Image: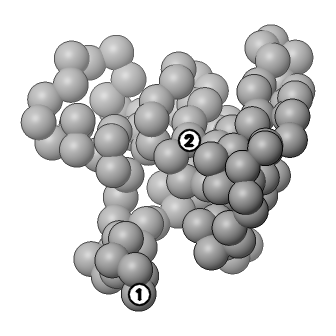
Amino acid sequence: MHTQRAMKEKDIGKKPNKQMRSYLLFGAVTGETWPDGRPVRKDWAKEYHGKPWIVYGHTPVKEPRFVGRTVNIDTGCVFGNQLSALTYPELKTVSVPSSMPYDDSRFQHFTS
């Protein structure tokens, strides 16, 4: 399963309605915003316990991030870091460097 952002196990295989599309596109948000106006996002991957693997992006991280059966492969190519992909079924990541200027402020930092 690949999604732009977040995915709830109960929604896998369903035709997206308006509420599901919003969650798929924007993920779970806290209601707070960062100084630049971007929404603060919840770490939805910690709450996903489904069997299907979810491969997602749109929340830039410095290295591919595996949490349970999810992997965020958005490693911020547009922000100067790297472009990443996931091989399946091996579940290995491959990354190449970006040619864009690096902007550290654009990366999400998660706490364990």
Q: Is residue 76 visible?
A: no
Against 40, is 13 above or below? above
The amino acid at mark 2 is Gly
Residue drawn at x 27%, y 77% as measured from the top left: 31
Q: Is residue 54 visible?
A: yes
- In space, the residues marked 2 and 1 are separated at their CA atoms by 22 Å
Q: Residues within 10 Å of mark 1 (few under 14, many from 20)?
A: few
Residue drawn at x 48%, y 55% as measured from the top left: 44
The answer to which quarter of the image holds residue 89 is: top right
Task: Tell me the number on the disc at residue 57.
Answer: 2
Which one is in front, 92 or 104? Answer: 104
Colour approach in the figure:
one colour
Against 13, is 23 above or below? below
Which one is in front, 9 or 31? Answer: 31
Q: Which residue is mark 1?
A: 35
Q: Is residue 29 left or right of residue 41?
A: left
Q: In the orientation shown, which residue stands out farthest toward the left?
A: 18
